[in-house]
Image (cartoon, rainbow, N blue to C red):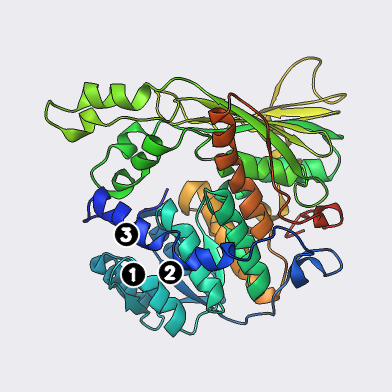
Amino acid sequence: MNHFQSGPTRRDFLGWTAAAGLGALVSSCQSSRSHSGPGAAFLQQGDGLFRAPKIPEVRIGFVGVGGMGSAHVNNFLRIPGCRIAAVCDIVESKVARVQDQVEKAGFARPIGYSRGPTDFERMCAEEDLDLVFTATPWEWHVPVMLAAMKNGKHGATEVPAAYTVDDCWALVETAEATQKHCVMMENCCYDRPEMMILHMVRKGVFGELLHGECGYLHDLRDIKFSTDGEGLWRRHHAMKRNENLYTTHGLGPIAQCMNVNRGDQFEWINSASSKTRGLELFAKENFPEGDPRRDEKFVLGDVNVSLIRTVNGCTIYLAHNCDNPRPYSRILGVQGTKAIFQGYPHRIYIEGVSPGHAWESWDKYLKQWDHPLWKAQEENAKGAGHGGMDYLEDLRLIECLRNGEAMDMDVYDAAAWSVVGPLSGRSVANNGESQKIPDFTRGAWRRRAPLGIVGA
């Protein structure tokens, strides 16, 4: 969902990715990987949650300032206790635009980096930064995060954090080895309905959780075939990968409610994909003869459905569909022994409270169960991206760094929520065969403290 380039072609981008994506930055992690051991000091603290020393003012280096990157820049210019000290993008005019914007906001002009697709390595090595934030195409998330941590900086990345099993391990092991945060910025964990549900779950309204339903169902055909922005890179993934391609928007909030990595753990996943039709039909119906997009072939099934089971016996239905006509939905279903929530449209049923066998609108309970963070920050979040949730995720990132607190979402969440994507692909390729989901915490999930109600 991020823009890193606008001028170069997709072929240029893929060439750069081959040179930089899984090269030297990742190979050093893979060469010694054992996937075992206690997880260094990350998991040795009393509650199993990693905390870094407090940072009075968080100095940020940005990599990728297209659509989502620019939205985050706008947020950080309004959040106390941070400043943008460096900015990197392969498009020099984008760097200059952000430099001017930061300076106009009353801060020192950030140092610019735009000498090509890997200039973020120079920024990470040269600049005195606390945090490197990347909002690049998916291929660059892991290389940027590894460069940041290996140069002594915390890292934050747009979603997904990674899309191979080895890269998920690389992020975890590098974070542990360097004692740096590696955070995936899953904004949907901060949407108002999701946070209200979490609040109600923590207060016992749902009883014991049993099942979740989630997904990413979003007609992206126009965006995927665009000649700029995401159209330069996102469509390529549908040519190579047949899996649940974009997992974290729906899965993250459900995982938090179920205490995944903090009292429960993903155990296995199986997955199936439908036939492939949507993108090829769209190209033939919308582009003239001679347009090369008409001849592209895709392997991604239009609809992917996956089933996840946790160690403690919860089940999660996870769906993906971005290539057909449909209204937007993340499904957002939570079933407990005492209540159920279903999203899009949002509705709730609480046993003994709601009328018998009848849904109620979710906002009937908003005043009582609105999350304290939303109550405190509603005015500040107005006008920010995606209804304000982008501001809340950026605010919490800076607050945790400044106060030396454990992150709401840490590297183990980044890895676990992301790894179900490639594992769903393995399941699809093996006729729906179940795939074991790695325990990135190496058993520490049993004692790691659940996410509390922050802001309360």
Comparing marks 1 and 2, which lies closer to the viewer? Answer: 2
**Residue 276 seen from this side:** yes
Q: Eyeballing the image, is 390 above or below 364?
A: below
Using a 10 Å C-alpha cutoff, classify the residue at mark 1 as few (fewer than 14 neighbours), some (14 to 19) or many (20 or more): many
The x, y position of residue 368, in whole percent, is 76, 42
- All told, the count of numbered labels is 3
**Residue 71 seen from this side:** no
* Residue at figure coordinates x 69%, y 75% from the top left: 52
The x, y position of residue 408, in whole percent, is 69, 58
- Give the residue type that dot 3 points to: Trp
Q: Residue furthest left?
A: 290
Marks 1 & 2, CB-CB < 8 Å contact: yes
Residue 175 lies left or right of residue 285; in this view the side is: right
Q: Which residue is mark 2?
A: 62
Q: Which residue is mark 1?
A: 98
Using a 10 Å C-alpha cutoff, classify the residue at mark 2 as few (fewer than 14 neighbours), some (14 to 19) or many (20 or more): many
- Give the residue type that dot 2 points to: Phe
**Which mark sits nearer the N-terminus, 1 or 3?**
3
The circle on residue 16 is 3
**Front-most of residues 201 and 320:** 320
Q: Eyeballing the image, is 391 above or below 228?
A: below
The circle on residue 166 is none
Q: CA distance from mark 1 to mark 2?
A: 10 Å
Marks 3 & 2, CB-CB < 8 Å contact: no
**Which mark sits nearer the N-terminus, 1 or 2?**
2
